[in-house]
Amino acid sequence: MISASKASIPSSQQLYTRSNIALPEYLALSRITFEWADSYDSRQFDRLEAILAPEVTLDYSEALGQRPVTMRKSDFMKLSSNPNQLGGLVGCIHHIGGSKYDRTGPDTVTGYHQVRTEYKRYKTQEKKEVEAEGHGLTLMVHWYKKIDGAWELTGTKPEVRMNEFNFEKIFTKGSKPKI
């Protein structure tokens, strides 16, 4: 029989998930994941910049057939907010489903997120007429590192599960990121 006495309930400092992530860390990592998605959706790139480590690794080997690359935060921001990417004619909304986190070191964690992203490519900057729609379903892998006492996003790797509709027309020729 399990006792429900106060003495048998762990404090928040002792409460851990199965992968040995303390609750405060879990909340910090979840917040970073939310900021990553919502900063793209809202075009508030300053929020994206605030969660990034000084260097960011992008592994789009599966999604785009390009080799992984590590770049400075400033270069990643230029790539992300580029008018040919998510800073221009393409609108998106990221829906984050289930997430799990695995500790990979004392100050490193890998996160796995089920993500469905809806994209619309508009004909003009006024965004009144849609040129193409597409949905991407991915397992988004995020790498996190604790730097100077704070968790930061150090990299991403989308593992494509399925694309729907006219996804191939969202990032047209010349607008696919060259990383």
Image (cartoon, helix red, strand yellow):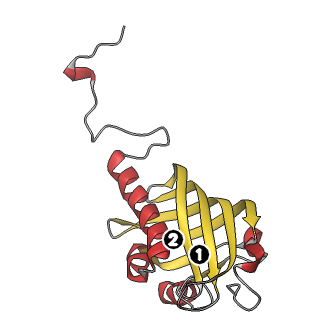
Secondary structure under badge 2?
Answer: strand
Instruction: Locate the N terminus and report the quarter of the image it occupies.
Output: top left
Q: Quadrant of residue 47?
A: bottom left
Would you say the residues marked 1 and 2 are in contact, meaning their CB atoms lie under 8 Å apart? yes
Q: Is residue 17 left or right of residue 93?
A: left
Residue plotted at (49% across, 75% down) = 40
The residue that label 2 is drawn on is: 154
Q: CA distance from mark 1 to mark 2?
A: 6 Å
The residue that label 1 is drawn on is: 57
Residue plotted at (77% across, 89% down) = 173
Please state the horizontal and vertical placement of residue 91, each as a whole percent of the image. 56, 77
Q: Quadrant of residue 57?
A: bottom right
Residue lying at the far front in this picture: please name it.
128
Q: Quadrant of residue 178?
A: bottom right
Q: Where 39 sits versus 76, above or below?
A: above
Q: Where 37 sits versus 7, above or below?
A: below
